[in-house]
Image (cartoon, rainbow, N blue to C red):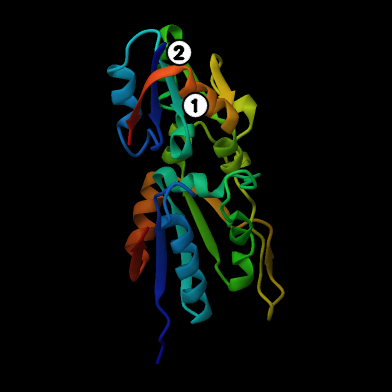
Amino acid sequence: MSELHTVNKSPFEKNSLETCLRLSKAGSSILLYEDAVYGALKNTVITDLVSSAAGDRKVYVLEPDLKARGLSADRVIEGVEMVDYAGFVDLVDASNKVQAWV
Amino acid sequence: MSDTKKFMFLNRRAPYGTIHAWESLEVVLIAAAFEQEVSLMFVDDGVFELVKGQDTSEIGMKNFSPTYRTLGDYEVRHMYVDKASLEARGLTAEDLVEVEWEDWETEETVDNIVEVVDSDKVVELMEESDVVFSF
């Protein structure tokens, strides 16, 4: 059982994602949803940070929120996994603790 | 006597996560209906408002993005996008909706009023405006 961190704010507007990446343990899971899905995009000023975090943590992004914002799968950083709502529930179920970075 | 003012709507928030983007659009439509000279500026996360292909069917929210494409019909003549904000987000002009404009009296048409501009131009455009509304 590991920890699940959730982030829902745009990384370009708030530092929630950055702080989450700085203060989360290797082996934990991070789910990006709502405006935080922008953190899963390639070629942005935050891409490198998220890519390197994906090396020792598992990073997920909620697909319905990507679709809502007009963002297709090919824009998502390699190593970041897309999940649907059922996948979100599975992640929560598989974790012993959920920490929200609001 | 001219009652027309230059209104600029400065949009700096992403759609859906907060109500700002939608509220801005509502006020733009009101201002345009009162025959003011309306332009829109998209800076920071506001550039995400114009991303093509938005599909909100799975998040239970209204997809208001098609409304941007009708703004030309409401006599909105300019929609400016800050280049630096686009680049920081891995986006290009090709990722954005196109908005057609037509003057119904002169039949003058512009294929796309969405224009990517540099920082100096943003400064100049804000300076030229009588009122800047921030969202």
Residue A53 occupies quadrant: top left
Residue hosting label 1: A40
Which of marks 2 and 1 precedes in the sequence? 1
Q: Is residue B44 above or below residue B128?
A: above
Considering depth in this image, is B81 or B27 the residue closer to the camera? B27
The reply to the same-chain question for discs 1 and 2 is yes
Report in which chain the residue with disc 2 lies. A
Residue hosting label 2: A54
Q: Which residue occupies 49% across, 82% down?
A: B34
What kind of element bears circle 1?
helix
Type of the residue with mark 2: Ala
User: Quadrant location of the N terminus of chain B?
Assistant: bottom left
Type of the residue with mark 1: Ala
Q: Is residue B82 left or right of residue A79?
A: left
Q: Is residue B1 left or right of residue B115?
A: left
Considering depth in this image, is A47 or A25 the residue closer to the camera? A25
Q: Which residue occupies 37% across, 36% down?
A: A12
Q: Does any portion of residue A84 appear in the rendered image?
A: no
x then y, percent, for residue A30: 42, 21
Verify CB contact (< 8 Å) between mark 1 and mark 2.
Answer: no
